[in-house]
Image (cartoon, helix red, strand yellow):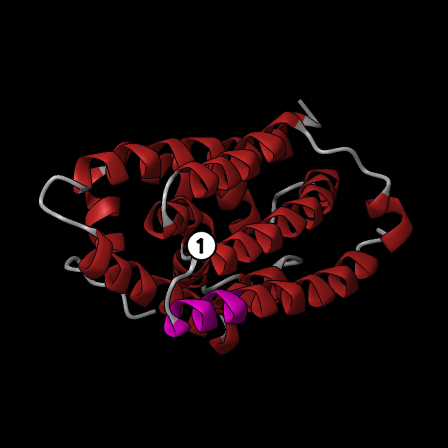
Amino acid sequence: MKENAQTLFGRLKAAAPEEWNAFARHDFLRRLGDGTLGEENFRQYLGQDYLFLVQLARAYGLAVFKSDSLEDLRQAAAGMAAILDEMGLHLKYCHDWGLTVDEMGQLAETGATTAYTRYVLERGVAGDLLDLHVVLAPCVIGFADISTWLKAEYAETMDDNPYRVWVDGYAGADYRKLADAQMAQLDTLLAVRGGPDRFPSLLAQFRQAVRLVTACWEQGLAVTR
């Protein structure tokens, strides 16, 4: 992932270290990385992640609606296509973990899933395209960041890790391409829609989005507490 401190995403991360570390180095991820995460915890996460992806696809649909240039339209459409493709892979992966399509279709969203995804949609409706992409960033770009860390931090035991397929999926070239495109789009939108006084409001939204998506890891651990 072509991240650096000068990108908008890099600046937002650097300005929210407490929130970002709580999200990207959460105990759920550490247990996933060392292979000690309980299967029940992971299955709960997988079921909610399916519902999560449904709402992210809707968010990219909203990005299409909010776009006012051909390039913005193309980026939003490509993002939606990538999420829909990811959902197909996710369904296959869930099947491997004993979760059927019918079962996931009957799941109810937890509070954490609803809170983050509806915040994304609300910010997209109330704000502009830059606001929408900023609150999507912790998830869309963050998962590439997290998977890179997991592969490096737990490299010695990753071969035998039951969750390796999940890590490899988000560390793979296809997902990195999506994350890089999202990062580049943030910088493009900032150049067009930003200004010297815009960063504080973007940071406030980013921090809230990170806090809300962190709760999705918490709910994954809560099922066995």
Amino acid type, callout 1: Lys
Bounds of the magenta segment: 70-79
Pick the front one: 154 or 196: 196
Residue 35 lies, in percent from the top left, at 60, 51
Taking the view exactly as shown, the residue that stands out farthest to the right is 102
Give the mark count: 1
Dominant secondary structure (helix, strand or loop) of the stretch shown in magenta: helix
Taking the view exactly as shown, the residue that stands out farthest to the top is 225
Tag 1 residue: 66
Residue 81 lies, in percent from the top left, at 60, 69
- Identify the residue shown where x is 18% and y is 42%: 199
Magenta residue check for 76: yes
Q: Quadrant of the C terminus?
A: top right
Q: Residues within 10 Å of mark 1 (few under 14, many from 20)?
A: some
Note whether 48 is above or below 180 in the view shown: above
Indicate left or right for 193 with 23 as reference: left
Taking the view exactly as shown, the residue that stands out farthest to the bottom is 173
Residue 216 lies, in percent from the top left, at 56, 35
Indicate left or right for 91 with 29 as reference: right
- Identify the residue shown where x is 28% and y is 59%: 189
